Image (cartoon, rainbow, N blue to C red):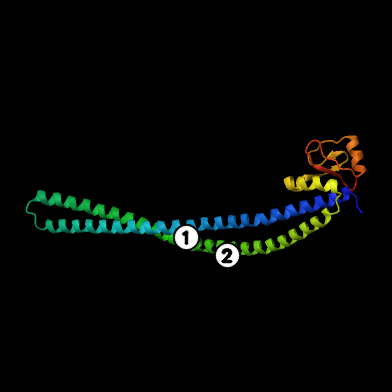
Amino acid sequence: MPGPATILRELHRLHRHAEDLRTQINRGPQTIKAHQEKTAKLEELLHQAQDSIKKLKVTLHDKEVTLKAQQQVVAKHEKQLNEVTSRKEYDALRSEIENDKKACTKIEDAMLEVMEEIETRNLQIPEYEKAVKKGKEDTAKVIDDVQTRRNEFTDRLNEALKSVREIETSLPDDVRALYERLVAAKGESAMSAVQGRTCTACYTEITAQNHNDLLQEKLVLCKSCGRILYLTESA
């Protein structure tokens, strides 16, 4: 029957393996969340682009209304131009008409800029839609992959824990009681290998007596970190 050192060494390996598997399992939801957040940001960019186009169209409509009103003013003044009787009134009205037409030109130029901006942003929409579609497809693939890996890791974790339970029965009663208490509190950090005469967890050197006790398969705790110590196979 193997001594406590061999048993503890294998138990520590299995506990670390189980912890690694738990980490992999817990990482899955985080990975999914990261992809979902990335896709949500792409969707927000798409919505912002669509909203900006709607606002630009409202602006364009307002300018069209303003232009129509201004053109009506021009038409009104041009009609009045045929009705004036004095040169002074004629010149004043002509000047006003010129200013009105300049105002119309200014509005038309502004409308052209808005239309160009709408056209530019409309060209961006398909790219945003393509990015959103790809983001959703990638997220769906990640969810499938995570679920597949989760099932695989869960099976492996259950196998590791089963092996732990089986091997734990081989521990001497005095060692097992302390082992169970420490594992319940610290998990895989309840144990540490000794390399040479150094605890590999906290890098504290153990005493010669402690090292001798380990050689004799006695229970030894690290005086610095409180872990159950065991010798490596090469010790």
Q: Tell me which amino acid carries mark 2.
A: Glu
Residue 220's spot in the image, x, y percent? 85, 41
Give the total number of marks visible in the rendering.
2
Task: Provide the secondary structure element on which disc 2 rests.
Answer: helix
Question: Residue type at mark 1?
Answer: Gln
- The quarter holding residue 38 reads bottom right
Q: Quadrant of the N terminus?
A: bottom right
Query: Mark on residue 186?
Result: none
Q: Which residue is mark 1?
A: 124
Q: Which residue is located at x 82 percent, y 57 percent?
A: 166
What is the crowding at mark 1: few (fewer than 14 residues within 10 Å), some, or many (at least 20)? some
User: What crowding class fits label 2: few (fewer than 14 Cα within 10 Å), some (14-19), or many (20 or more)?
Assistant: few
In which quadrant of the rendered view does residue 191 lie? top right
* Residue found at x 88% / y 50%: 6
- Tell whether 127 sits left or right of 52: right
Judge left or right: residue 108 versus residue 234. left
Q: Residue at x 73, y 45 (%)?
A: 185
Q: Nearer the viewer, residue 88 or 100?
A: 100
What is the CA distance from the residue labelled 2 to the residue labelled 1? 20 Å
Could you say which is closer to the camera, residue 37 or residue 74?
37
**Nearer-N-terminus badge (2/1):** 1
Q: What is the secondary structure assignment of the residue under circle 1?
A: helix
* Residue 157 spot, x, y in % from top left: 74, 58
Task: Please state which of the two labelled residues, at mark 2 or mark 1, is closer to the viewer.
Answer: 2
Marker disc for residue 137: 2
Q: Are marks 2 and 1 in contact (CB under 8 Å)?
A: no
Vertical relation: 217 (above or below) 150: above
Looking at the picture, how far across and down is residue 45, in whole percent? 48, 56
| Residue that appears at 24% across and 59% down | 68
Would residue 67 appear left or right of 114 to someone viewing this image? left
Q: Nearer the viewer, residue 57 or 76?
A: 57
